[in-house]
Amino acid sequence: MFPPVYAIVDAEVAGERALRISEELVEAGVALIQYRDKSATARRLFEICAALAARLRGRANFIVNDRADIAALCDAGGVHVGQEDLGVEEARAVCGARWVGISTHNAEQLSAALRTSADYVAVGPVFATTTKKNPDPVVGLEFVARARALTGKPIVAIGGISVQNAESVYRAGADSVAVIRDLMATGKPAERAAEYIRIAAKVRSGQS
């Protein structure tokens, strides 16, 4: 079963605490963690990702944002690409059997992504988000439901998700919710992650 919480450890939010936060998240039961740093040099990004990959190996699936080459070099669990990065098949040519996920923001992008070998498809922003400087238009829960109806691939919902609205996102059909800022909202990311896991378990138990 696809992990219900997709934790994104963003350098702007986590700073130098990326390793410690990732450790805490794993201890709380998070099994899927992505590291994202849009401003680091290639060398610095490799160093951080290599450390995270080594620390998380065998405990959680570690995903590198954007950079398929770095994911392969540090033997990460996979790479996540956006619409302006390498395509899914090009990323897979670099990463091999590792996971390759892709972000989609509209019906055209979703349709294209579903024709690729992507292991999962992210859809969003589901709600308004402040994490990105120039976010795409909000797609809403209806788009999550639409994506769910079109594919058996895991659907990851992203954008403005919090413990207050997570249940509605799972019920719309998302297998997992990608969370950045809300994990840090209380200063206790592990406790917040555990809340998401409980919400997902509640929804899944009701659907079984």
Image: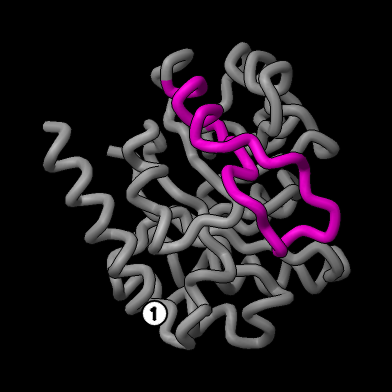
- In this picture, is 116 found above or below 44? above
The crowd level at tag 1 (other Cα within 10 Å; few <14, some 14-19, many 20+) is some
Q: Quadrant of residue 188?
A: bottom left
Tell me the magenta residue range: 121-148
Closer to the camera in the image, 35 or 197:
197
Residue drawn at x 48%, y 72% is 183
User: Quadrant of the image for the C terminus?
Assistant: top left
Q: Is residue 154 left or right of residue 75?
A: left
Residue 71 versus residue 96 in the image, above or below: below
Camera-side residue of 138 and 29: 138
User: At x 20% / y 51%, what residue is drawn?
Assistant: 201
**Which residue is disc 1 drawn over?**
24
What element does badge 1 sit on? helix
Which x, y percent locates residue 104? 67, 32
Q: Is residue 169 left or right of residue 206?
A: right
Pinpoint residue 200: horizontal percent, then vertical percent. Answer: 27, 50
Placement of the N terminus among the 4 image quadrants:
top left
The number of callouts visible is 1
Is residue 185 shown left or right of residue 195? right
Amino acid type assigned to the residue bearing label 1 in the image: Glu
Is residue 24 visible to us here? yes
